């Protein structure tokens, strides 16, 4: 097998994206598990095999794709990319206007209901739960094990996150989302 040399003169190597961004496809239901850490606090609701957690350095080149930010210290919190806490974490890497607006709230459903929605891949039901939940919109939610979050983005994504495990430096979730 022959390997072709890369033309580095056309690549921006000063701040490469850690992994390719593969946007969600409209109408496709995604279910997955993910881990977010202080080193990988950015959440992208993207195509299933794309990496959901990203480092801060990815923010510059993919600001409009950031859907949530996980913040560690004094507990673990999740927030909209446009929330002040997120903007402080992102520092001067992005202009706030380039960020996606996300609404988050407690989903108000049981773990059993979450698991059923996730297993049945019912995107319409997922979107209904998220729409009802965001009427209680919060910019920042403190996470505990068992928390179920509803997420809605201005780009038309609807998601649910079940917090499975939390440490001082990481949070593991089971999740699902759909782009309508």
Image (tube, grey):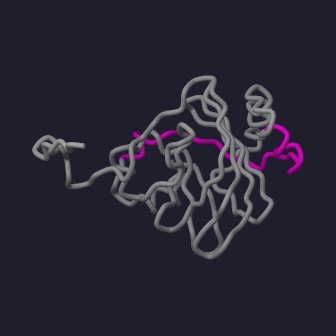
Q: Nearer the viewer, residue 131 or 115?
A: 115
Reply above or below: 152 against 68. Answer: above
Q: Nearer the viewer, residue 61 or 119?
A: 119
Reply above or below: 28 against 105. Answer: above
Corner quadrant of residue 20: top left
Q: Is residue 83 left or right of residue 148?
A: left
Residue 29 percent coordinates (x, y): 67, 31
Q: Nearer the viewer, residue 39 or 120?
A: 120
Q: Is residue 115 magenta?
A: yes
Residue 30 percent coordinates (x, y): 64, 37
* Residue at (24, 43) in percent of width and height: 1
Residue 147 percent coordinates (x, y): 78, 57
User: Which segment is the magenta one?
Assistant: 95-117
Q: Residue furthest front?
A: 1
Q: Is residue 25 left or right of residue 123?
A: left
Residue 163 percent coordinates (x, y): 73, 59
Q: Is residue 108 magenta?
A: yes
* Residue at (57, 61) in percent of width and height: 36
* Residue at (86, 46) in percent of width and height: 109
* Residue at (14, 47) in percent of width and height: 8
**Quarter of the figure that contains the C terminus:** top right
Reply above or below: 77 against 112. Answer: below
Total of numbered circles in the picture?
Answer: 0
Q: Is residue 109 left or right of residue 7?
A: right
């Amino acid at each position: 097998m022959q390997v072709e040399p890369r033309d580095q003169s056309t690549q921006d190597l000063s701040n490469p994206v850690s992994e390719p961004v593969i946007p969600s496809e409209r109408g496709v239901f995604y279910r997955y598990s993910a881990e977010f850490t202080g080193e990988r606090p950015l959440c992208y609701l993207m195509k299933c095999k794309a990496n959901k957690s990203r480092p801060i350095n990815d923010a510059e080149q993919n600001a409009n794709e950031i859907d949530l930010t996980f913040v560690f210290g004094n507990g673990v919190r999740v927030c909209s990319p446009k929330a002040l806490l997120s903007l402080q974490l992102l520092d001067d890497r992005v202009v706030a206007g380039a960020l996606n607006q996300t609404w988050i709230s407690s989903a108000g459903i049981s773990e059993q209901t979450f698991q059923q929605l996730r297993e049945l891949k019912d995107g319409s039901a997922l979107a209904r739960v998220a729409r009802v939940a965001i009427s209680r919109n919060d910019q920042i939610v403190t996470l505990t094990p068992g928390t179920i979050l509803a997420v809605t983005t201005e780009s038309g994504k609807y998601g649910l996150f079940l917090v499975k495990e939390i440490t001082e430096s990481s949070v593991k979730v089971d999740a699902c989302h759909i782009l309508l």
